[in-house]
Amino acid sequence: MRGLGLLGLFLWGLGLAQASILYLPLDDRPPNWAPCTWGLVVCPPKEVYRAFLGADLFALRAWLLSTPGKALVASLDALAYGGLLQSRHLPLAPEDALARLGPLLSWRVRHGGELLLFGVVPRWDATWRQRNLAVLQALTPWARLPRVYLEAVWDDALRNSPAPKEAKTLSYPSRPGADEAGQVLLLRASRPGLKVAVVYEEESLEGRITPYEGLPLRDTVTGLLQSAFAQRVSLEEGPDLVLYVYGGRNPREATHDLLRLMPRFPVALADLSRVNRGDPGLMAYLQALGLYARLAAYASWGTPANNLGSALAQGGLFLKDPEGRLGRLAEAYFAYWWGEVGRPWVRSRFSDPLPEGASAVKGLWPYLELEGRRVELRQVGFPWGRSFEAWGLLEASPLPRVPGVVK
């Protein structure tokens, strides 16, 4: 998946997990691992995931079977192959991959929790694409089990990619995406039935065939809402959340839309103007007018499905958690900054695997204020040793009071 990293270990006080929802991520790249830092879920130990080496499958199964919970959101590819990268090229017979998934049903029997599972229909260059598809097809009976939700997401569908057609051969739900899937299913587990209104920057955007997905945007949005078990409503029906879909046509008009919507509803903004990067024109308006800190969520780090899913999930998960919402906005801004400033700077100076000196990029971090707090970037790390993804250690501190000024 063409995911951008945004693992912000945001020092706003995350606390311990408050709900017994287990989360088994696709891998430890930042967008997949990030929910493990939010204080909402119970995750495997970080050392179980090992970047390019893939997950330690023995340790992952041991953790799973010994950890109770009311629900489990789990990546099939992590448990069968060790992660997304490994799923593309690991030589493994279909029956052996299926056997590795058996602990999921054992967990359900042992602990009685709900299963929310997602598997990936591989992209065009995967060596073992047909094997992976056969495994997903063999899981059809699982989709009919009580308290089991199963879906497939397809990864990076360039023009003429076989993935969308292959996904249609499955008898259970499928849609584009991958790195946002865990976040979306966490929303399904935590807040099923969330009322969401979708507002497009312009009506014609609904029919646009989006990069890496191979179908009209309206279908991607519909699939994401179904994954989240969200209820689509109109603005007049009083949504819990508005998902605003920005296509990059006119940042000024989009800002006017947000100014009309935000006094009435929480708004999650998905910036689809570019793949893996946001629109600096729109961000400039958001910052100048003080709108960014008031958003329910923001995402611009990946493909359209990545951004839509992240904005929807984070907007819904943190609707009633102001501190958590600000933490996610800080992380999302780091991801925007990495795509716009950090990654280009690093790539112009260093080759992968990155040397230690690449962390000097943190000196380019701008002034960022969120709700009376200044957000500093204390450290930049590269969990996979490459420039594509990065995580930021962010710290927020109160702005000093100015004598005589009342806010």
Image (tube, helix red, strand yellow):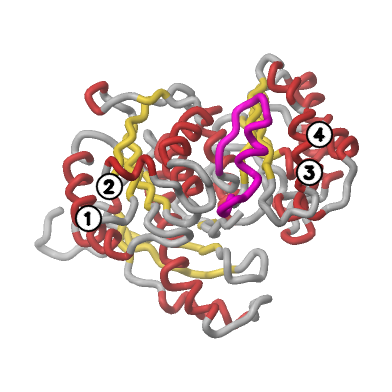
Q: Residues within 10 Å of mark 2 (few under 14, many from 20)?
A: some
Label 2 to label 1: alpha-carbon separation: 7 Å
Label 3 to label 2: alpha-carbon separation: 45 Å
Element type at marker 1? loop
Name the residue that disc number 4 marks: 101
Name the residue that disc number 2 marks: 294
Query: Which quadrant of the view contains residue 5?
Result: bottom right
Residue at far left of view: 404
Sequence-first disc among 3 and 4: 4
Q: Are marks 4 and 1 in contact (CB under 8 Å)?
A: no
Label 2 to label 4: alpha-carbon separation: 42 Å
Q: Residue at x 65, y 81 (%)?
A: 355
Residue at far front of view: 160
Q: Main secondary structure of the magenta part?
A: loop
In front: mark 4 or mark 1?
Answer: 4
Q: Are marks 2 and 1 in contact (CB under 8 Å)?
A: yes
Which mark, residue 130?
3
Query: Which quadrant of the view contains residue 399?
Result: bottom left
Task: Tell me where the magenta segment starts and ends, as one range.
Answer: 157-176
Q: Residue at x 68, y 14 (%)?
A: 146
Name the residue that disc number 1 marks: 290
Label 4 to label 1: alpha-carbon separation: 47 Å
- Residue 114 versus residue 219: which sits nearer the camera? 219
Specify whether 55 is left or right of 379: right
Residue type at the position of mark 4: Leu
Task: Check if residue 166 falls in the magenta segment.
Answer: yes
Sequence-first disc among 2 and 4: 4
Q: Residue at x 49, y 42 (%)?
A: 215
The image shows residue 281 at horizontal and vertical percentages of 27, 64
